Amino acid sequence: MKKIGLIESEKCTFCERETEKLAHSFWACPKTQNFWTNFKVWLQSCQVFAKGTPLEPDIVLGLRRDSSKHKIQIDFCCLIGKYYICLCRQKKCSPKLNDFLLHLKHIYEMEKKSTRIAVKKWEPLLPHL
């Protein structure tokens, strides 16, 4: 992004220490790590992610699909989580779980209006939005 003139600095938008590369921005940055830690706790509270199971970077980054019973919810939430991180980068604010949950709830409301089929994937998450 620096090379094509879209940003002034090569430093990470969030921590401003490391070079902003995809793996750093979406996983290794302390600010995004904090988000993913809180995200994992939230998924555990929804009972879609087993306690004691690490949230692995290859699942978060979409390099490997989750294989658990709730793989659709986990993969979907990781995808939306990465999109939310992109939005935070544009706004130059740190990703926060509460803001992410508001964003996720908004997506649910839009899907609910457009189709009844997609609502099933939301069932385990709805009480926690």
Image: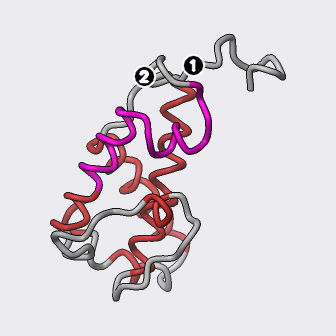
- According to the picture, the residue beneath numbered tag 1 turns out to be 11
Determine the residue positioned at 35% across, 82% down: 70
Q: Can you give x and y, in whole percent of width and height, for residue 109 in the image?
A: 42, 61
Most distant residue in the front direction: 18
Q: Which residues are magenta?
A: 19-39
Magenta-drawn stretch, dominant element (helix, strand or loop): helix
Q: Is residue 29 rendered magenta in the image?
A: yes
Determine the residue positioned at 35% across, 42% down: 33
Q: Amino acid at mark 1?
A: Lys
Q: Amino acid at mark 2?
A: Cys
- According to the picture, the residue beneath numbered tag 2 turns out to be 15
Apparent side of residue 103 relative to residue 35 in the rendered image (left or right): right
Work out whether residue 63 or residue 89 is closer to the camera in this orientation and state it.
63
Q: Determine crowd level at label 2: few under 14, some 14-19, many 20+ residues with C-alpha closer than 10 A.
A: some
Q: Can you give x and y, in whole percent of width and height, for residue 83 in the image?
A: 54, 48
Apparent side of residue 43 relative to residue 92 in the rendered image (left or right): left
Q: Can you give x and y, in whole percent of width and height, for residue 11 in the image?
A: 57, 19
Q: Is residue 33 rendered magenta in the image?
A: yes
Q: Quadrant where the C terminus lies?
A: bottom left
Determine the residue positioned at 53% across, 58% down: 61
